[in-house]
Amino acid sequence: MQTVKRAGRIHGDVRVPGDKSISHRAVMFSALAKGTTRIDGFLAGADCLSTISCFRRLGIDIEQNGENVTVQGKGWFGLTEPQDILDIGNSGTTIRLMMGILSTQPFHSVLIGDESIARRPMKRVTGPLRQMGADIAGRQNGEYTPLSIRGGKLNGVEYHSPVSSAQVKSAVLLAGLQAEGETVVYEPECSRDHTERMLRSFGVDMESFDGGVRVRGGQQLISPGDVHVPGDISSAAFLLAAAAIVPDSHLMIRNVGVNPTRTGIIDVLKQMGANLTLHNEREVNGEPVADIEIKYAPLTAVEIGGSLIPRLIDEVPVIAVLATQAEGTTIIRDAAELKVKETNRIDTVVAELRKFGAGIEPTEDGMRIQGRTTLSGAVCDSHGDHRIGMAMAIAGLVAEGTTGITQTEAVNVSFPGFFELIQTVQLPDEK
Ligand code: S3P
């Protein structure tokens, strides 16, 4: 069990590990492009390591040394039939994007993952891929893993996704890259666009328009040579939240990706009254990057919903923690997607924060959180969900006494070194 004590203040000048979404895509697209790609800033967390191991099984030579990865791509059809199953571990991004890629390949493959993956819905991807002609089988008619894919020739599709999901959009676009004709994906609200940005840097021509993305089939990827991965704003969010709620804090986080499809947390922090500034804004590999400075300031409640939700979906657990320390009632709506993440994050956030004495209630598509509350140290559980484990650790920094968190190995999925880093940025509470 990991323990966290109430902190005196949070201060320092730090970096966070590489962006998870961008790290996955960097490995996948490098493997599918002809030529050598050197990736730096790679997130050596469990999820992205699963992506590497799957592509090795597909015959791609990948050297990984911490944050540095070299991929010897062989072109889109340079992958070979895997002799064994492809185990994607806990990673929804790996399985869903690979479904799109494997559907175009002239061979058979089988995808499995852990217990959490076995409960997550896959029809959202199986459905449109089948419309394109893909042959995919799985439990409950392709809803759940294990999934078996017999790849082959696909036709372009015009797909109106009922959910705003970058994993769905990316899977269909990747399949569309090798399909006959044109593929268009529409989504209700714009989800993160790392696939579109990175594919462009690999020489792919695709058109993003209001409400969707269009791609022409038959395009090959060309390696840009180098890919630099910025720090993950979803990891930075935990540290930003810590500095936002622990009085007298002052923290600088360098080299964080600030793609507008991911910066909902910055908008929410500012709206709550946080003293937050972006410095040195620049563009790296077509992705906006900045250094983020935050100083403690009292927070007020917010209402969050609509198009903001996809821009902060992974940050809801830590936003709930922020809300316990903000004056007033925070309401989060339009976030039913939380129910199909690594855990049902409406249920797990509510159950765990209640252990600290937080006033929090689940709703059909989100939650209501009463602030400000004095939290008391508790023994809580990550439920095997990295972001739940980290959110509870941040709650522990403002809770009276000591907090214990079980199953914290899950944190390695996206933020190896998280507990060490929060130790280095805090001064003990002298009260
Ligand atoms: C991701 C997309 C999001 C996000 C996940 C990473 C990606 O999932 O929650 O952590 O890299 O494409 P959905 O596509 O299910 O919204």
Image (cartoon, grey):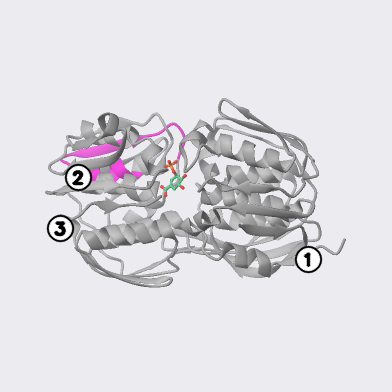
Asked if marks 2 and 3 touch (Cβ < 8 Å), the reply is no
**Residue type pointed to by label 3:** Thr
> Mark 3 highlights which residue?
80
Residue 315 in picture, x, y percent from top left? 57, 46
The quarter of the rendered structure image containing the N terminus is bottom right
Camera-near label (2 vs 1) is 1
Q: At x 37% / y 35%, what residue is drawn?
A: 121
Q: Quadrant of residue 146?
A: top left
Taking depth in this image into account, of 131 and 246 the one nearest to the observer is 246
> Label 2's element?
loop
Camera-near label (3 vs 1) is 1
Identify the mark nearer the N-term, 3 or 1: 3
**Residue type pointed to by label 1:** Pro
> Label 3's element?
loop
Q: At x 77% / y 38%, what residue is drawn?
A: 371
> Mark 2 highlights which residue?
217
Within the magenta stretch, is there residue 189?
yes
Question: Compared with residue 388, is residue 361 higher up or lower down, i.e. above or below?
Answer: above
Taking depth in this image into account, of 95 and 220 the one nearest to the observer is 95
- Taking the image in four quarters, ligand 1 sits in the one at top left
**Numbered range of the magenta stretch:** 170-190
Inter-mark Cα distance, 2 to 1? 57 Å
> Mark 1 highlights which residue?
428
